[in-house]
Amino acid sequence: SDAQIIDEHFLVHLNDYLSSGEIFGLFTDDEVEEILNQLRPEAKSQGYNETKESIWKYFIDKVRRNLKIVMCFSPAGNTLR
């Protein structure tokens, strides 16, 4: 129900992820740089180029393989109980 959704902004992120596989604007520029720096050796060992775009693609591919989303809501009405 609407009472269970305290902040509707997370629905925008969820919709973005479901429609495109990415959540735009989730990370600041500094956070993106940190992710790229940490994943550079791993991405390179997996055959990815050392460009920012290639390493970011490696990160997104890795997230898509591993991210699971579970949404739980209280059942409404006797049909769902």
Image: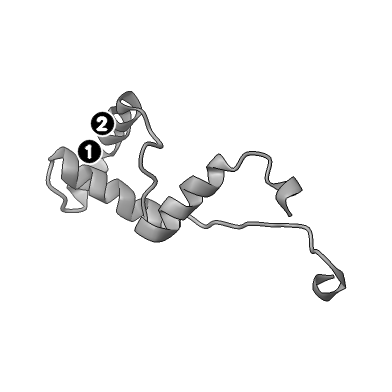
Report the residue at 22% width, 38% height from top. Answer: 40
Looking at this view, name the residue that lies furthest to the front.
2
Report the residue at 68% width, 46% height from top. Answer: 5
Gap in Å between the C-alphas at discs 2 and 1?
5 Å
SS category of the residue bearing label 1 = helix
SS category of the residue bearing label 2 = helix
Mark 2 touches mark 1? (CB < 8 Å): yes
Q: Which amino acid does label 1 sit on?
A: Arg
Looking at this view, name the residue that lies furthest to the top.
30
The residue that mark 2 highlights is 37
Q: Where residue 18 sits in the image (x, y, percent)?
A: 44, 59
Numbered label attached to residue 40: 1
Q: Where residue 23 sits in the image (x, y, percent)?
A: 39, 46
Q: Where residue 16 sits in the image (x, y, percent)?
A: 42, 51
Q: Is residue 78 above or below residue 58?
A: below
Looking at this view, name the residue that lies furthest to the bottom.
79
Q: Is residue 80 above or below residue 28?
A: below
Quadrant for the N terminus in the image = bottom right
Report the residue at 35% width, 57% height from top. Answer: 20
- Colour scheme: one colour
Q: What residue type is labelled 2?
A: Asn
Quadrant for the C terminus in the image = bottom right
Q: Where residue 59 sits in the image (x, y, percent)?
A: 31, 46
